[in-house]
Amino acid sequence: MKKLYPEYDCSIDLVIDLIGGKWKVLILWNLNEGAKRFNELKRSLPGVTQKMLSQQLKELEEHGLVERTAFEETHVVYSTTAMGNQLKAVLFEMCKWGDAYAEKAGIVMNRCSSTYDFTK
């Protein structure tokens, strides 16, 4: 698991340690819509392996951004915690910035959902 340092010079370094990398941000983005089962998350993240998704979810859970709720032995749901929910607006702004950059650079991509209510 990704260990956090006891001290950081810059809060951006801490944020990068918490959500840095390709999959963590995308996991959090997908959980913006609400709780999801493991296989739902896996389907929404083309290219992620089961091992990688499991590892990233465990790290996000360890750092208090995602919670894992087991309803039965085979029914597990992942959702963001209160701290994880605070990232919704930040992730949405990153998505909008990415859309603007892509448009300027001529990169074709799907757009972020501008109708999603990030105050929930």
Image (cartoon, rainbow, N blue to C red):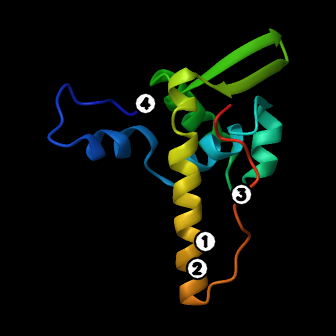
**Picture layout, residue 102 above or below residue 85:** below
Q: Judge depth for marks 4 and 1 and give the one in front.
A: 1
Q: Give the residue type at disc 3.
A: Ser
Which is nearer the N-term, disc 2 or disc 4? 4
**Residue topped by disc 2:** 102
**Marks 2 and 3, the one that precedes in the sequence:** 2
* Mark 2 Cα shell of 10 Å, populated few (<14), some (14-19), many (≥20): some
Q: Nearer the viewer, mark 2 or mark 3?
A: 3
Q: Earlier in the sequence, mark 4 or mark 3?
A: 4
Q: Residue at x 76, y 53 (%)?
A: 115
Q: How many marks?
A: 4
Question: Against 23, is 99 above or below?
Answer: below
Q: Which mark is residue 99?
A: 1
Distance from Cα at disc 1 to Cα at disc 2: 5 Å
Viewer-proximal residue, 64 or 116? 116
In front: label 4 or label 3: 3
Residue on which the image places disc 3: 114
- Characterize the local packing of mark 4: few (<14), some (14-19) or many (20 or more) Cα atoms within 10 angstroms: few
